[in-house]
Amino acid sequence: DDNTTEATWIFDILLWPAIEIAKQLTIQTQEIVSQLQPDEFFNCAWGKKNKEITSPNIIKLIERFNLVFYWIIEEILRYDKKSIRCKVIEKFICVALFLNEFQNYNDLVLIVSALNSNIIKKLESTLSMTGQVYKKHWIELTNLCSHEKNYYELRKHQSSQMRKGDDNEKTSLDIASGLDYEISKKASTLKVTMIKEMSNDSMKISENDNNDKSPMIPYLGLLLRDISFCIEGCAYTKD
């Protein structure tokens, strides 16, 4: 069936540049974030009755987080061959690297959480096949998004990104693009050429975008955590 073949090619994650996947995730998240209203955070409304009415966009972000979380796991498990599963994991690591450069920390934490989920951790033989350079970046991103010490590393990183310039961003983007291209080498010559052209076009756009400091999408869970503590945690800190 021609339609089935076309649909399979369109949604095959291994055939799309990681930078494009990261961009689309960021665009989708930004569309919801831009609609957030201050009163949605009032009195922890997102966790109370009628939350869909009082905090509609927060609920949308939470539901999207969960949806994409399980989509990532499903994308990895849908392949029977360990070697292909390994490539999908490496692809998501590349996507996470781009999300970090785009300062989309909400989706960065999302991907890192999915890759470190108990379901994926059980794929020990598959994970052992992951390339050393990908493992290195995976460990670094995992440490960055760790919840230890109240997300100390993520807080520090987000704060530093708001103060520093873009001197090193092009190099980081080049590294991520190089890693992503390695994953696609086994595709057909035509598809590899298309992927390379798409990646090059995306890199040109990204370099132009980075002339000015790009906006940041913080990790929503961290914001909700802090607000909850400020409102509800005060009861536990009174004398």
Image: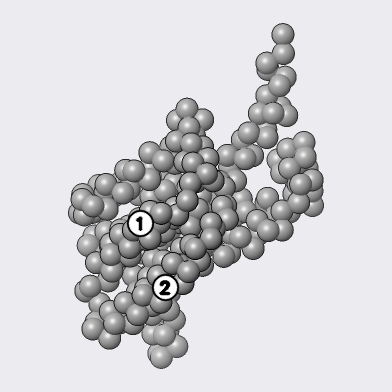
Query: Residue visible at 58% across and 39% down?
Result: 222
| Residue 80 in sight from this viewpoint | no
**Residue 93 in the figure: left or right of residue 234:** left
- Residue 139, image x, y percentages: 32, 43
In terms of depth relative to the viewer, which is nearer, 110 or 95?
95
Measured along the vertical axis of the image, is residue 37 above or below residue 76?
above
Let me know if residue 220 appears in the view: yes
Residue at disc 2, secondary structure:
helix
Q: Is residue 148 above or below residue 38?
A: above
Callout 2 crowding tier (Cα within 10 Å): few <14, some 14–19, many ≥20: few
Residue at 47% of width from left, 51% of height from top?
Answer: 165
Question: Circle 2 sits on which residue?
Answer: 204
Q: Label 1 is placed on what type of residue?
A: Ser
Vertical side of 115 occupied by 32: above or below: below
The quarter of the rendered structure image containing the C terminus is: top right
Residue in view at x 33 percent, y 63 percent: 174
| Label 1 CA crowd tier, 10 Å (few <14, some 14–19, many 20+) | some
Query: What is the residue that sits farthest to the bottom in this orientation?
Result: 2
Name the N-terminal-most of marks 2 and 1: 1
Q: List the residue tagged with mark 1.
A: 172
Q: Identity of the amino acid at label 2?
A: Lys
